[in-house]
Amino acid sequence: MPSTSLSIPNHVAIIMDGNGRWAQQRGLPRIEGHRRGVETVRTVIKACRELGIPYITLYAFSVENWKRPKDEVGALMHLLEFFLKKELANLIKDKVRILTIGRIQDMPAGVRKQLDKAVEATAAFSDLTLVLALNYGARTEMIDAARAYAAAIAAGETKLDDTSWEKFSRYLYTADIPDPDLVIRTSGEMRISNFLLLQAAYAEFVFTPVLWPDFAKADLAAAVATYAKRERRFGKTSEQLKPAATS
Ligand code: IPE
Ligand code: IPE
Ligand code: MG
């Protein structure tokens, strides 16, 4: 369901960052920050429903995150599996559709099983779509898309000469997901970390120093208010965007 108000972004994508620092500041193990981060995920899903944001993507695990210590990776996978198991009934009750982007086939079997279940059980919903970016990297997405595109050309399903962004983008993980309008990164870092490089081509960016476990509905609302004040020109001049003056 598209957002009805122009000041409300149709798609918000979030780089959830700062769990480790949140825990370290309190003398707690990093995993405690991740546990609190899961609570924030619940809060943010609810806030999206209340604010009328129809699409939300959460960057939960990057292809680079496998390089972290083994026990942190294991704990993150466990948390994810547990979250899906525990939350599915609520997601169904709230009519939240679950989608995934990333190399899901390389996620642990237990996580995959919960993901398959969640995606299947929520496929018919359309009020709010929650996209989980898991084992996601924009560069691997590009490689996967290029491979699939080449295979389609070889199979005679499409022609190289007909290549357009519209056609090629059908081979990205996000084929059926609109581009993000607003990308938020928490924890004060100001980088994209291999997230939605192509889809965010014209997204507005909001960076907040708030660490992900502390991110609240008010912080999401503040980011949306900042977004509403931006002028999205898409290459045009400011004058072209103003309604024609009446004489
Ligand atoms: C984000 O928090 C969660 C994931 C990347 C999975 P971090 O774990 O990156 O937290 P910091 O950046 O170390 O504080
Ligand atoms: C980006 O956060 C990935 C996710 C939020 C899942 P990182 O904490 O991994 O990013 P870098 O390494 O600081 O750029
Ligand atoms: Mg980080």
Image (spheres, grey):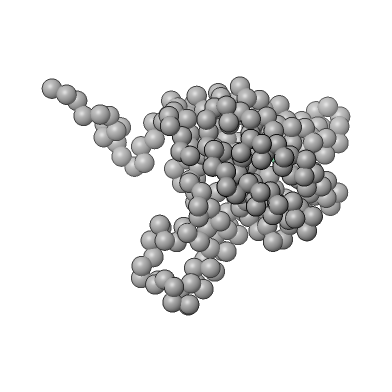
Q: Position of 117 compared to 168: left or right?
A: right
> Going 58% across and 31% down the picture, which residue do you hit?
48
The quadrant where residue 216 appears:
top right
Vertical placement of 66 versus 200: above or below? below
Residue 84 vs residue 154, the one in the foreground:
84
> Going 41% across and 58% down the picture, which residue do you hit?
165
User: What number of labels is visible?
Assistant: 0
Residue 68, position as x, y percentages in the image: 78, 50
Q: Position of 194 compared to 105: left or right?
A: left
The quadrant where residue 45 appears:
top right
> Going 48% across and 72% down the picture, which residue do you hit?
152
Residue 91, position as x, y percentages in the image: 67, 39
Residue 181 seen: no
Residue 241, position as x, y percentages in the image: 29, 33
Question: Which part of the image, by quadrant, shows the C terminus?
Answer: top left
> Going 60% across and 59% down the picture, which residue do you hit?
140
Vertical placement of 11 versus 221: above or below? below
Residue 161 vs residue 206, the one in the foreground:
161
